[in-house]
Image (cartoon, grey):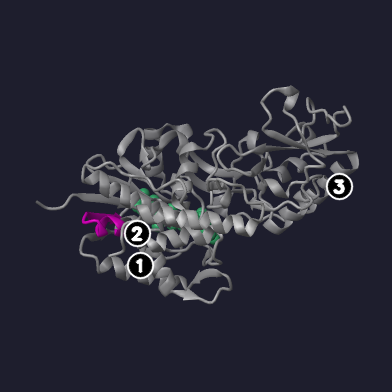
């Protein structure tokens, strides 16, 4: 009997990793890539594994979160991380690669794999006849995106990302902020940074002068009025922010009994521990400018940012609503989603979900039940975030320590805490990852 054939759509970062993991587990794979016949606005070549922007796969400093995710993948026999190691160029503390050698390595490895056949064609609808890994990325071609939106429900597929910055809880000055929900409704999940008239004026002036990233043609945003970037709001007039995301009404400062001139609300992240989101503060400022401007907010003078605000073209699913813990579409369980489209952000996160989707699809193709990685691992924590985050405000995530479970015994020293989290994660990964063959 010939082995079951699985389709993998998308030859970026997630797709080739998924294809390789399927082949490694004995499955026949057809890998579909539409380039060079049809391209995306960001890709420049026909190569598999093209890095569309920077050539950095982030930090290699031991006991950092990006290192941990890579380390788990390396221990699990990830093809793309092996290719990255072979294509590495000096890059300080980061894993930086020669992008052409990286792609050439992936293409050579898949060409040498008899179970993988590469088909250079655009797929325009979700296959119905077999198990499929969908890894078509943030710039999924329009016909396929339309079909996906039809299957999952239009409101489950975002086309633009407007994401707010996230700060580490222990970098907030708790002497300056106060806990309160608007009109006392909504629990104790909010901290408030009060601004007086002068502080507000200074903040607006700095925001107006701050430099934004230039938008490429394909990124020209069609903003929803409800999620305009703050630099766009301030351009509409000095008072606009005070009647929008910096609205102070219903938020008296318990220390003075008075309502401040303006307020920035920080909302505790539901699934991430130890971090707060700046509510309604999506923006497109350069990261350095963003750090400078946001640190003018009382209480955030020394904020450490886990994520900066961003606005860019990005198709991704509302993972907590539409995906199962094995990355299957709830509406069509033969389709598994990987890469940026499944609601992660970043090259290594795309490789990681490609790895997981490959492993899960292989189990399903054999009639077995996919087993997710332990929650203590970086792989498991990324997956846990995707499936359990609050659906309404869902934003794609990078791996950071606040996605990992806290230690059973709190450790105040950051370096020791992170080292302990990494040791626990790698021990747990060892129980789940298949042996490298
Ligand atoms: C402009 C831009 C810059 C980015 N810069 C960075 C960065 O510097 N660092 C970082 O970590 N992350 C970056 N990202 C985010 C993300 O990590 C990358 O987009 C990453 O490439 C995602 O991997 P992926 O496999 O999900 O998608 P991709 O790498 O985009 O791969 C998807 C593949 O599917 C193909 N495809 C699409 N539709 C179809 C179809 N219908 N049929 C067949 N093939 C199809 C595409 O041609 C593409 O090859 C960036 C994203 C964008 C959009």
Instruction: Check if mark 2's residue and mark 3's residue have beta carbons within 8 Å.
Output: no
Give whichever of 19, 409 is nearer the camera: 409
User: To which quarter of the image does residue 176 belong?
Assistant: top right
Give whichever of 147, 422 is nearer the camera: 422
Question: On the picture, is 202 further left or further right than 413?
Answer: right
Helix, strand or loop for disc 2 = helix
Q: Which residues are magenta?
A: 20-34
Q: Residue at x 74, y 33 (%)?
A: 244
Q: CA distance from mark 2 to mark 1?
A: 8 Å
Instruction: Check if mark 2's residue and mark 1's residue have beta carbons within 8 Å.
Output: yes
Q: Decide if residue 145 is in sight here.
A: yes
User: To which quarter of the image does residue 18 belong?
Assistant: bottom left
Give the residue pinned by disc 2: 16
Give the residue pinned by disc 1: 106
Identify the residue at the far left of this view: 1
Q: CA distance from mark 3 to mark 1?
A: 51 Å
Residue 428, horizontal then vertical, whole percent: 42, 52
Query: Sequence-wise, which precedes: disc 3 or disc 1?
Result: 1
The correct choice, above or below, for 422 with respect to 56 in the image is: above
Q: Decide if residue 10 is in sight here.
A: no
């Amino acid at each position: 009997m010939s082995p079951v054939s699985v389709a993998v759509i998308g030859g970026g970062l997630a797709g080739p990793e998924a294809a390789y993991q399927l082949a490694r587990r004995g499955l026949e794979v057809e890998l579909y890539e539409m380039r060079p016949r049809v391209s995306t606005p960001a890709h420049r070549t026909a190569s598999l594994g093209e890095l569309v922007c920077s050539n950095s796969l982030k930090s290699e400093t031991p006991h950092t979160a990006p290192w941990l995710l890579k380390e788990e993948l390396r221990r699990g026999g990830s093809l793309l991380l092996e290719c990255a190691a072979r294509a590495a160029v000096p890059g300080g503390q980061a894993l930086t690669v020669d992008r052409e050698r990286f792609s050439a390595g992936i293409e050579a490895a898949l060409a040498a794999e008899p179970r993988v056949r590469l088909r250079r064609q655009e797929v325009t609808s979700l296959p119905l006849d077999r198990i499929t890994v969908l890894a078509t990325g943030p710039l999924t071609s329009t016909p396929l995106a339309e079909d996906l939106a039809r299957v999952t429900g239009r409101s489950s597929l975002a086309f633009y990302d407007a994401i707010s910055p996230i700060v580490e809880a222990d970098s907030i000055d708790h002497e300056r902020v106060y806990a309160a929900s608007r009109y006392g409704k909504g629990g104790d999940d909010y901290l408030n940074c009060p601004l007086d008239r002068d502080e507000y004026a200074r903040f607006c002036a700095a925001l107006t002068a701050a430099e934004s990233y230039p938008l490429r043609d394909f990124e020209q945003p069609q903003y929803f009025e409800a999620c305009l970037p703050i630099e766009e709001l301030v351009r509409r007039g000095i008072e606009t922010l005070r009647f929008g995301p910096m609205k102070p009404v219903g938020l008296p400062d318990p220390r003075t009994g008075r309502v401040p001139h303006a307020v920035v609300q920080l909302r505790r992240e539901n699934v991430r521990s130890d971090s707060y989101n700046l509510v309604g503060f999506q923006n497109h400022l350069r990261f350095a400018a963003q750090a400078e401007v946001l640190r003018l907010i009382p209480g955030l003078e020394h904020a450490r940012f886990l994520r900066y605000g961003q606005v860019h073209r990005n198709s991704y699913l509302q993972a907590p609503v539409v995906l199962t813990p094995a990355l299957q579409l709830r509406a069509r369980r033969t389709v598994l989603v990987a890469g940026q489209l499944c609601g992660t952000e970043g090259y290594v996160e795309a490789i990681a979900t490609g790895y997981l989707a490959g492993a899960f699809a292989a189990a399903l193709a054999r009639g077995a039940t996919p087993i997710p990685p332990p929650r203590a691992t970086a792989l498991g924590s990324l997956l846990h975030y995707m499936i359990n985050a609050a659906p309404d405000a869902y934003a794609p995530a990078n791996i950071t320590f606040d996605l990992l479970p806290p230690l059973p015994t709190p450790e105040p020293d950051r370096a020791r805490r992170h080292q302990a989290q990494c040791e626990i994660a790698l021990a747990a990964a060892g129980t789940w990852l298949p042996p490298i063959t």
